[in-house]
Image (tube, rainbow, N blue to C red):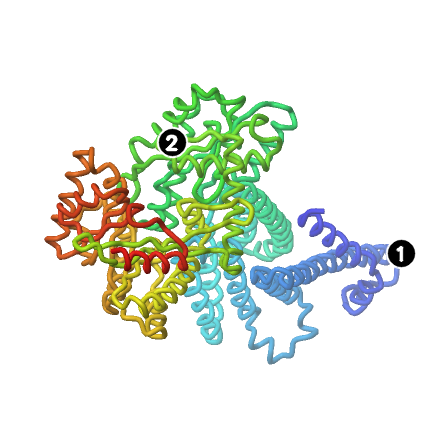
């Protein structure tokens, strides 16, 4: 049963309860000296019985009215206990004051009031002013004026203090206080109701209507008292009726309010509360319905690449505004396609877009996408964002990554279809076309990636990782300069896993810092052993771009250097060129800490990034390593010769050593020496090898030179 039905039922029970108490009514009537002067005759006896019935009916109706108000008060107190909404408290107080005032006007309260109290109350003026305060607070809370119109709320609270002041004025000027209070109250209520009226919500309209009888009655009484009309006594008889009408309408308003809240909760369970777009639950329901009907369809996930930038630059609210605008433009751009329509209610244009997750949108296309049309569809999606989205005075322009998966070609159920589309959009971000249609082998790749991430965590704790050492030689005299430490993983099931494969997995799984800590600790331990035999031996350790964000990495390094009593100048930290460009601020902070210790800095794989040597010079590195792709074809490639020669000359001008990787033969080594390269590294001197083999290699090389 609805709230409104329960209220009507309680009111009906209250009326019946008072009709079923004749002894109570008779006891009241018997105490009233209304018909004591009639002579003893048949006609007078009939008249006496008629008057008695009228009085009995009058008090029965009054009993019913009192019962309704008391039950309503009790019911509101129960609601307050369960909801903690003060609206119900104010409403109960408003009803109680109305009840006391009406009973007082009928003379019933004289049985309970002392003469002194009656004198203080001044014909109920005090109670009336308290009633004004309760009524004002009730209206303010029901209409949520504090939230919707703070200025009006402050004004209404100030007027309540005026009512409190009129209570003291009432002692000396009761008539003026009463009339002035009534006028102020009516004007205030009218202002609040007009300002807070919202035709969009039914409970709001009904609540405003509920005050019409009360306001009309007050205005009528003011006019009647001003012109000293005798009809004011008859006007007062309509007050219980006005209150009953108001109670019924307010009960209906409460019912509608809770119904609207339930509908709102249902709406937000199926829609994104920020953008208003249908959410993932609606999408899943639509997909399930299509699959139940055995209809082919395609799920397309669209991920705007600019969303992350908008969130970090403008904030979450603006990023959501950006996504909302993107959805609108996509909805218009894709309206010509055979898309599933989602959530058409109240929209002039059918909506095809759902918010799949925080940074992604999704659409459902009937049937499968032909391979030859994928590029055309991707073009349509990108065209929607070609002009950019205007946000806070800035046009945000960017691409979108598009992941595509079809039913039943790629998946057999809703969950699989979403998973396949997500895998596709992840691979699309790595594609130059920024779109990717799911392939069955793609799932195997993702599963392997997840397994490697889990196994890598075990490998760290089980010491399955191994360090290899590749020698570095000074070209001017063929003496040993040092070595580069390289990480290797021999998987117990999959065999050898190259670093190019598992290092990105470690970065995406959040394990790279743990891997780097393990490498640093093991490498420095071996480096200590090398220094005991070769005091000037240098050891180079690679770190990841993510390690630059870890401010305590230099602390770990300096602690180990101190503990092992190692000269910091014999340690070289290598980081890729792209790592220094990705976040130069964090890179500078960490690198400066290393420089203060005396640790040398090397830029690895120079030439593969997008920075200039002038930019990298700001990092004040000690070494620069030319990537092997520019070295291995040095004998034949004029381009590589120019790159190597120019890089060596620029590095020398900045006071840095040059290390060339990928030296495969003596001719390349000689060319590099002619260019002025100091150090070489490659298979011509030695391949990467375990530590024990490297110790033996050092001994052999020292003997043979």
Q: Residues within 10 Å of mark 2 (few under 14, many from 20)?
A: some
Give the secondary structure at mark 1: helix
Mark sitting on residue 42: 1
Drawn side of residue 620 relative to residue 468, left or right: left
Q: Nearer the viewer, mark 2 or mark 1?
A: 2
Give the secondary structure at mark 2: helix
Q: Is residue 110 above or below residue 664?
A: below
Is residue 353 visible to us here?
A: no
Question: Which residue is the extreme one toward the front?
Answer: 704
Q: Residue at x 60, y 75 (%)?
A: 118
Drawn side of residue 704 relative to residue 75, left or right: left
Give 316 or 126, whichever is nearer the viewer. 316
Provide the residue designation for mark 2. 329
Q: CA distance from mark 2 to mark 1?
A: 91 Å
Residue 253: horizontal and vertical position, in percent?
59, 48
Q: Residue at x 13, y 46 (%)?
A: 674
Q: Find residue 472 and report its image quarter.
A: bottom left
Residue 132: horizontal and vertical position, in percent?
52, 63
Q: Find residue 32 and report its image quarter.
A: bottom right
Is residue 84 visible to us here?
A: yes
Mark sitting on residue 604: none
Q: Residue at x 34, y 27 (%)?
A: 383
Residue 587: horizontal and vertical position, in percent?
27, 57
Q: Is residue 475 above or below residue 93?
A: above
Mark earlier in primary sequence (2, 1): 1
The quarter of the picture where the C terminus appears is bottom left
């Amino acid at each position: 049963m609805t709230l409104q039905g329960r209220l009507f039922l309680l009111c009906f029970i209250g009326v019946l309860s008072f009709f079923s108490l004749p002894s109570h009514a008779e006891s009241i009537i018997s105490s009233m000296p209304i018909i004591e002067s009639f002579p003893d005759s048949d006609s007078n006896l009939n008249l006496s019985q008629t008057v008695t019935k009228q009085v009995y009916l009058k008090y029965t109706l009054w009993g019913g009215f009192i019962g309704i108000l008391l039950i309503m008060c009790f019911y509101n107190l129960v609601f307050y206990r369960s909801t903690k909404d003060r609206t119900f408290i104010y409403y109960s107080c408003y009803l109680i004051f109305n009840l006391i005032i009406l009973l007082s006007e009928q003379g019933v309260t004289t049985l309970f009031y002392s003469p002194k109290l009656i004198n203080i109350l001044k014909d109920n003026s005090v109670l009336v002013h308290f009633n004004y305060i309760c009524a004002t607070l009730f209206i303010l809370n029901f209409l949520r004026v504090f939230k919707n119109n703070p200025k009006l709320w402050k004004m209404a609270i100030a007027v309540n203090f005026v009512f409190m002041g009129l209570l003291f004025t009432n002692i000396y000027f009761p008539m003026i206080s009463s009339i002035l209070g009534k006028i102020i109250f009516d004007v205030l209520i009218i202002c609040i109701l007009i300002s807070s009226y919202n035709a969009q919500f039914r409970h709001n309209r009904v609540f405003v209507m509920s005050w019409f009888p009360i306001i009309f009655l007050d205005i009528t009484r003011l006019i009647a008292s001003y012109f000293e009309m005798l009809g004011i006594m008859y006007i007062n008889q309509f007050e219980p009726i006005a209150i009953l009408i108001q109670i019924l309408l307010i009960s209906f308003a409460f019912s509608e309010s809770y119904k609207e809240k339930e509908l709102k909760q249902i709406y937000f369970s199926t829609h994104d509360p920020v953008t208003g777009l249908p959410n993932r639950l609606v999408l899943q329901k639509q997909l399930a319905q299509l699959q139940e009907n055995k209809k082919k369809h395609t799920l397309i996930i669209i991920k705007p690449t600019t969303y992350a930038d908008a969130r970090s630059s403008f904030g979450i609210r603006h990023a959501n505004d950006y996504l909302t605008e993107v959805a609108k433009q996509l909805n218009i751009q894709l309206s010509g396609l055979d898309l599933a329509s989602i959530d058409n209610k109240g929209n002039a244009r059918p909506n095809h877009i759902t918010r799949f997750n925080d940074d992604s949108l999704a659409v459902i296309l009937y049937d499968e996408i032909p391979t030859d049309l994928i590029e055309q569809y991707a073009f349509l999606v990108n065209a929607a964002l070609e002009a950019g989205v205007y946000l806070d005075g800035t046009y945000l322009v960017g691409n979108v990554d598009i992941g595509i998966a079809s039913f039943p070609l790629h998946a057999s159920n809703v969950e699989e279809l979403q998973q396949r589309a997500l895998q596709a959009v992840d691979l699309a971000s790595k594609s130059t076309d920024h779109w990717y249609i799911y392939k069955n082998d793609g799932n195997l790749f993702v599963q392997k990636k997840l397994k490697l991430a889990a196994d890598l965590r075990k490998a760290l704790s089980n010491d399955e990782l191994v360090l290899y050492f590749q020698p570095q030689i000074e070209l001017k005299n063929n003496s040993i300069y040092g070595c580069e430490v390289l990480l290797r993983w021999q998987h117990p099931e999959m065999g050898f896993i190259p670093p190019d494969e598992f290092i990105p997995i470690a970065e995406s799984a959040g394990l790279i810092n743990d891997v780097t800590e393990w490498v640093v600790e093991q490498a420095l331990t071996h480096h200590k052993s090398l220094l005991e035999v070769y005091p000037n031996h240098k050891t180079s350790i690679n770190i990841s771009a993510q390690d630059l964000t870890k401010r305590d990495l230099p602390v770990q390094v300096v602690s180990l250097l101190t503990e092992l009593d190692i000269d910091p100048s014999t340690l070289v930290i290598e980081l890729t060129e792209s790592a220094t460009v990705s976040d130069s601020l964090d890179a500078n902070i960490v690198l400066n800490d290393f420089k203060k210790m005396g640790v040398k800095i090397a830029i690895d794989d120079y030439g593969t990034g997008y920075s200039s040597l002038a930019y990298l010079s700001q990092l004040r590195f000690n070494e620069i390593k030319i990537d092997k792709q520019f070295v291995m074809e040095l004998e034949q490639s004029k381009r590589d010769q120019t790159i190597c020669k120019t890089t060596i000359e620029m590095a020398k001008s900045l006071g840095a050593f040059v290390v060339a990787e990928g030296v495969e033969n003596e001719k390349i080594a000689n060319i590099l020496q002619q260019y002025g390269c100091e150090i070489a590294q490659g298979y011509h001197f030695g391949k990467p090898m375990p530590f024990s083999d490297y110790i033996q290699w050092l001994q052999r090389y020292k003997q043979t030179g």
